[in-house]
Amino acid sequence: MGEANGKQWVMLVAGSKTWKNYRHQADVCHGYQIVHQNGIPDEQIVVMMYDDIAYNKKNPYPGNIINKPNGPNVYPGVPKDYTGEEVTPGNFLAALRGDSSAVKKTNPKVITSGGNDTIFIYLSDHGGSSKFCFPNSTLYAHDLIETINEMARKNKFSKMVIYMESCRSGSMFTKLPHNVHVYAVTAARADESSHACYFDRVRNTFLSDEFSALWMYYTEANDLANNTLRDQFSYLQEMMRKSLSCCFGDMTVREHLIREFVNNTPPRVQGETRAEGLALTHLTSNNEVPFKILEHRIKTETDEDKKQHLIRKHQTLHQTKAKIERTVEAISRYFALEDALDEDYSQMDLHAFKTVAEHFRTTCFDWHEEEFQMALSHTHVFARLCARGVEAERIIEVITAVSRRRMFLK
């Protein structure tokens, strides 16, 4: 149970769209099934996902979404609270703080929490330094931390827990205060990729992610009335192979039982989950996922014309990756920026970084366009510059200069 006379609120967010990102919406659908079976009413669950997977033309099983090999359909019953163009950072933050007037949607469902309530948030998508992606826009750490601080000042929760599945997700919470009863767990450090898992050869896409598959398995396999958030984090640290789960914020929160946030998993489900076990397969860096999916399509395509078209797409993807790398390298050379271990981002001006990153996105490579999504993984260069105190105006000048030169060379 939550605090005395308090409610348990849950917010589940998939920030991506398109078939190749299947796993993010599958993660969120599975997350919904977990909290639903644990008895949290739909009125206290907010779900945001583009909803273009279940009936996608590439889905060989219409209406079916699975989150593990031969797994159950996790799509039935999932609330359609925010779908399509409603899945935005602005709507997410407004719904989280309970500001229905700021939501761009008719009759929106929002979290109307109070001082005795708990909030559990799970987000799954691509990310980069101090940012988490939505389908057509970006959630920056600056805006997320500002919203959390505002909610704390207004006594909108007793405790909040955030789980984030994305590359470089550890960079989102370096400035999360330690005194506002908010605890965050990430799929990766600030400087590393998270990893997809379970490649499905029939669906030709990945079904889940390493971090998400593990935390959900733990939640379903254990008695949450006897296991704390610290216990779950220890399990993640032990079991994750490809990236390192990190935690931030108020460490007193992780001493609380998981049940306080998501109720307890029914004993029957615990037994069935433990009996089935967990064996992660096809662990693949999220940066490599588009290449792996294309390579499988090329390998299995029998029509020669279609195969050649796919080969050209694969070559173009490599060329785009190289173009992004050359551009960022050119920007770095202006600052003689060398690699450094254990970069300290805790003093970084998050607003300055947001300004720089948005300028790079709009000037060079818009990572909301599918072909340029890889640009996300290179924006750590700007985070390092901001962390070292380089003024945003100077970085923007260099980005503009390099962009103009690149356009001229075309």
Image (tube, rainbow, N blue to C red):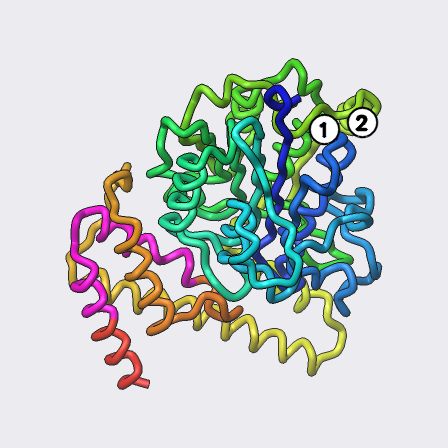
Q: Upstream in the sequence, badge 2 or badge 1?
A: 1
Q: Which amino acid lies under the numbered mark 1 shown in the image of this protein?
A: Glu
Query: Which residue lies under the disc numbered 2?
Result: 269
- Which x, y percent locates residue 15? 57, 55
Q: CA distance from mark 2 to mark 1?
A: 6 Å
Quarter of the image with the C terminus is bottom left
- Cβ–Cβ below 8 Å for labels 2 and 1? yes
Task: Please name the predominant secondary structure of the magenta segment in the image.
Answer: helix
Q: Nearer the viewer, residue 350 or 179?
A: 179
- Which x, y percent locates residue 358? 35, 64
Q: Quadrant of residue 172?
A: top left
For the image, the number of numbered tags is 2
Quarter of the image with the N terminus is top right
Q: Is residue 367 visible?
A: yes
Q: Nearer the viewer, residue 333 or 315?
A: 333
Q: Is residue 263 magenta?
A: no
Magenta-drawn segment: 375-399
314 in relation to 247, above or below: below
- Which x, y percent locates residue 388? 18, 47
Q: Is residue 31 visible?
A: no
Query: Which residue lies under the disc numbered 1?
Result: 220
Rendered residue at 67%/63% (across/down): 19
Q: Local crowd at mark 2 within 10 Å, few (<14), some, or many (≥20)?
A: some
